[in-house]
Image (cartoon, grey):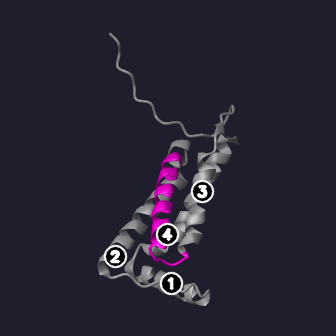
């Protein structure tokens, strides 16, 4: 078990990682540079699986995904809590599944590096939490209850 504060630190750390890794995919120009860099790295490591720049439609989805993940990361960084971390676990497991499927179908082995981080952060965020007095977990606002009169 980990403390609530440690869990919040993990949620923030996963958000920072996602910001760093994903920000480059937000625009067509930066995404093209990212794909060129990945291609050069794949070649340098002799992974024998090409990393190509996507066509315009695939680039659109790359940019949409990059934008959504950056916003999701900013939210987790600014408003970390256990619930948000658990939603992130679900997203990370879905990402890991799709990444493994892509590699199985011929995508670059470089993707497996990202898959490792997806799984590590998913496990870290799903660890059981001990609730301590004075913990800094942000409470979910409660709706006012109607007057029973």
Q: Nearer the viewer's eye, disc 1 or disc 4?
A: 1
Query: Horizontal and vertical percent for residue 139?
Result: 53, 36
**Residue 99, labelled with which disc?**
none
In primary-sequence order, the first of circles 2 and 3 is 2
* CA distance for labels 4 and 2: 16 Å
Furthest toward the top, the residue is: 149
* CA distance for labels 2 and 3: 27 Å
Marks 3,4: beta carbons within 8 A: no
**Residue 121, labelled with which disc?**
3
Q: Nearer the viewer's eye, disc 3 or disc 1?
A: 1
To which residue does mark 4 refer? Answer: 22
Please report the residue visible at 49 percent of the width from the left and 69 percent of the height from the top: 22
Q: Nearer the viewer's eye, disc 1 or disc 2?
A: 1
Query: Horizontal and vertical percent for residue 141?
Result: 46, 34
To which residue does mark 2 refer? Answer: 58
The answer to if 108 sits in the magenta stretch is: yes
Viewer-closest of 127 and 26 = 127
């Amino acid at each position: 078990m980990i403390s609530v504060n440690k869990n919040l630190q993990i949620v923030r750390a996963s958000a920072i990682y996602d910001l760093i890794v994903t920000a480059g995919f937000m625009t067509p120009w930066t995404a093209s540079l990212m794909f060129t860099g990945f291609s050069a790295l794949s070649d340098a490591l002799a992974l024998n699986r090409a990393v190509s720049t996507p066509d315009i439609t695939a680039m659109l989805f790359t940019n949409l995904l990059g934008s959504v993940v950056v916003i999701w990361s900013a939210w987790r960084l600014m408003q970390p809590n256990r619930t948000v971390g658990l939603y992130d676990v679900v997203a990370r497991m879905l990402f890991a599944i799709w990444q493994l499927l892509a590699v199985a179908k011929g995508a670059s082995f470089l993707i497996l590096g990202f898959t490792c981080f997806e799984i590590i952060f998913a496990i870290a965020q799903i660890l059981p939490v001990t609730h301590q007095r004075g913990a800094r977990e942000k409470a979910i606002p409660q709706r006012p209850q109607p007057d029973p009169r």
